[in-house]
Amino acid sequence: MITILYFLACAITFSAIAWSGLVLLQPKEEPLGDRLDELQKAAGAATVQRGPKRRLGGGFWESILYFVSALGGEDFLRDIEKSLREAGIRRREATAMYVLFNLLVMLALIAGALYLQRDGTLTDKLLALIAPVLLGYLLPRQVLYRLVARYKAKLQEALPDTIDLLGIVLGTGLALDQAMIRVSEEMQYIYPELANEFYTVVMQVKAGQERSRAFNALVRRTGIDDIKSLAAMIIQSERFGTSLSKAMKVYADELRMRRRLRAESAIAKAGIKMLFPIIIFIFPVLFAITLGPAMISVLRGLSGGIGQPR
């Protein structure tokens, strides 16, 4: 029984690894991210090279980040920090918690594999470590990617109604900062994710940061093209003194049209996505139920009494 469970776990593991590899290797077009990377590289080339920000002795979580960075994982940490920001997780110790969780998952899978191979040879034990190590690295990363996708989907869903309400509030004569605070308060219980993002922008502006830089930071945190267009529209309207309320109304209608097109595209893809589960899981069971009794009757009716009880 343990052998069957072990091979079943191996099959599930390799299937998950193959699927994760296909997802990770699939090319993704991110013009916004590419442009931001170019701007950051250009800004970095014009400034003095900064020293490492990780330091030992800043607490337990900071010490974890220091050791990971010292082992050559600084790029890994930056990637995780970027993904956590895009997922709406902005606590200082979130990156260290993710690293610790990733390590614990990997150790648990390795311990389970070694327990199943406790009676095997050294070669079998070494081969059994490949799948837990790969799965322990890919599984938390896939969970994080799902959190990022879910957070972005919530922001996309909230944009049309929030922008429409922002245009209405601006039409009453309030300034942009007061309008964003009012909209954040109204949308806090309906769309808390976007309300918190707007409130963060207002707090940054009140702290003395330029509005353009605050909105650019919002674009970097979310990584959504629609928010990038919104930020560009607000910055240009403030620069040239044009009316924001009318522009907001037109932009809200455009966002609703994009949301409808995304829904229609998802519906069109649903049939293709359902094809493989139907072929793999439903058709075999259906054939077994419908053809099984008929096959038994045919075998019993053949000469020689195949399948006939004695």
Image (cartoon, rainbow, N blue to C red):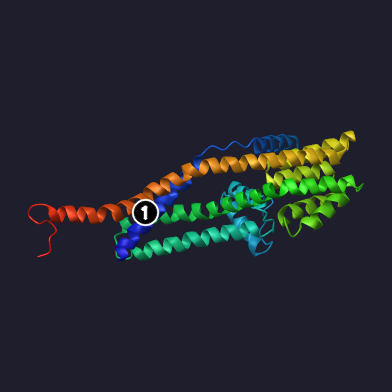
Q: Nearer the viewer, residue 225 or 251?
A: 251
Q: Crowding near pointer 1: few (<14 within 10 Å), some, many (20+)? A: few
Count of numbered labels shown in the rendering: 1
Question: Where does residue 288 sit, x and y in percent of width and height?
Answer: 29, 54
Q: In this view, does 77 lie to the left or right of 202?
A: left
Does 41 appear above or below 154?
above
At 15% across and 53% down in the image, what residue appears? 299
Q: Please identify the residue farthest to the right as the structure is shown.
A: 173
At 69% across and 39% down in the image, what residue appears? 257
Does 244 appear above or below 109?
above
Question: Where does residue 56 sit, x and y in percent of width and height?
Answer: 66, 59
Question: Where does residue 4 sit, x and y in percent of width and height?
Answer: 31, 61
Q: Where the C terminus falls, by quadrant?
A: bottom left
Does 265 appear above or below 123?
above
Question: Where does residue 236 sit, x and y in percent of width and height?
Answer: 83, 35
Looking at the picture, which amino acid does disc 1 mark? Ala
Question: In terms of secondary structure, where does tag 1 sit?
Answer: helix
Q: Please identify the residue farthest to the left as the structure is shown.
A: 304
Q: Nearer the viewer, residue 36 or 194?
A: 194
Residue of label 1:
11
The reply to whether residue 295 is visible in this rendering is: yes
Q: Is residue 60 left or right of residue 168?
A: left
The reply to whether residue 80 is visible in this rendering is: no
Q: Where the N terminus falls, by quadrant?
A: bottom left
